[in-house]
Image (cartoon, helix red, strand yellow):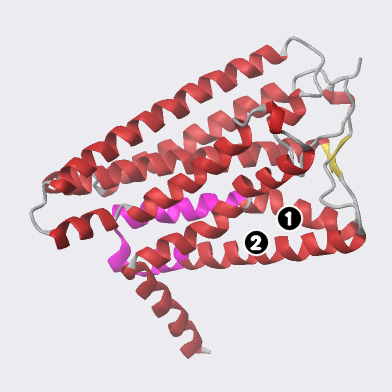
């Protein structure tokens, strides 16, 4: 029996069998990652430089953009390297780092989406208390709590996963390191500890989901009480970007991890992993910029200002 300490590297799942398809995957990943870097980078720069955007909603959006940048930079560069150089190896240390940072940024994103839901709830249901409940100090504390809880969650899962004895080889059925694939290599019952951690995390995720559903029920009730049709549309339109991003985030993860085993296959699993690890970070900036005129104006001002300087 060998354990994880005796494994020097893991073998990731190859994205394609032929050289032409490998180069095509490299180009696709390059395009998606550049789109994510550009979109999220513009949002971060626009919010940081635009003083009129220094509000709780845009502050949390900046944090969300940071988590999107981090998550796509954790998985895509290694996949691009492997496709370009026709290799599938990743060191044990690199695998642990990739697993930690992917969990860290994904957990932070979910926590931030929960906080952004609370922001929309207070804005629509308790507008007179908005400045009190979501002051600058409260926003900073909530963002810090999101990042700190994500760090603790990622640290616990990574440390526990890589303490398991592994005796089923070192081949992972995924193009990046994730917990389910590493658990498949374990031959010890000690992985029950990891399943316990996953159960606790799932309970917390479900708790946040219940909170978001409850908040949106209250938001819908408050919006329906607004007398004018224009007022109802304006109030609910501020929630649409958050709802779209949240739906994209949850649907891709649930589809990948909660589907019946009978419809599972390596190619389908690979496609689904692309959906939840690569697509949301690239689409989130587009969703928010399309639905928010203030953000579009700030991004345009930032871009035209930079061009005029050059």
Quadrant of the image occupied by residue 36: bottom right
Counting from the top left corner in percent of width and height, residue 9 is at 87, 36
Disc on res. 77: 1
Quadrant of the image occupied by residue 146: top left
Tell me the residue that label 2 is attached to. 33
Q: Does 41 appear above or below 162?
A: below
**Residue 271 lies in the magenta-colored region:** no
Quadrant of the image occupied by residue 179: top right
- Count of numbered marks: 2
Whether residues under marks 1 and 2 lie with C-beta atoms below 8 angstroms apart, the answer is yes
Image quadrant where one finds the N terminus: top right
Residue situated in front as seen by the camera: 242 or 46: 242
Q: Earlier in the sequence, mark 1 or mark 2?
A: 2
Magenta stretch: helix, strand or loop mostly:
helix
Name the side, left or right, on which 114 lies relative to 270: left
* Res 271 seen here: yes
Counting from the top left corner in percent of width and height, residue 67 is at 53, 49
* Res 140 seen here: no
Residue situated in front as seen by the camera: 212 or 295: 212
Name the side, left or right, on which 88 lies relative to 163: right
């Amino acid at each position: 029996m060998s354990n994880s300490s005796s494994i020097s590297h893991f073998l990731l799942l190859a994205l394609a069998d032929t050289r032409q398809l490998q180069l095509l995957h490299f180009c696709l990943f390059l395009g998606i990652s550049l789109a994510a870097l550009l979109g999220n980078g513009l949002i971060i720069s626009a919010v940081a430089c635009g003083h009129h955007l220094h509000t709780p909603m845009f502050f949390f959006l900046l944090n969300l953009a940071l988590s999107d940048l981090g998550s796509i930079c954790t998985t895509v560069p290694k996949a691009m390297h492997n496709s370009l150089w026709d290799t599938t190896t990743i060191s044990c240390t690199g695998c642990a780092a990739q697993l930690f940072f992917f969990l860290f940024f994904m957990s932070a994103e979910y926590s931030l989406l929960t906080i952004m839901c609370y922001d929309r709830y207070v804005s629509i249901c308790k507008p007179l208390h908005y400045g009190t409940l979501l002051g600058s100090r409260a926003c900073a504390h909530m963002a810090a709590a999101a990042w700190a809880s994500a760090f603790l969650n990622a640290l616990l899962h990574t440390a526990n996963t890589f303490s398991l004895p592994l005796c089923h080889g070192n081949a992972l059925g995924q193009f990046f390191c994730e917990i389910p694939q590493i658990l498949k290599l374990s031959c010890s019952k000690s992985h029950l500890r990891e399943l316990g951690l996953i159960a606790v995390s799932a309970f917390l995720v479900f708790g946040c989901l219940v909170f978001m559903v409850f908040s949106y029920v209250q938001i819908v009730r408050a919006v329906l009480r607004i007398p004018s049709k224009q007022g109802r549309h304006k109030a609910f339109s501020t929630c649409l970007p958050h709802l779209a991003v949240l739906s994209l985030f949850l649907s891709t993860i649930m589809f990948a991890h909660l589907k019946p085993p009978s419809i599972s296959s390596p190619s389908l699993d690979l496609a689904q992993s692309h959906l939840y690890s690569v697509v949301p970070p690239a689409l989130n900036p587009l969703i928010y910029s399309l639905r928010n005129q203030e953000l579009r104006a700030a991004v345009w001002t930032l871009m035209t200002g930079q061009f005029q300087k050059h």
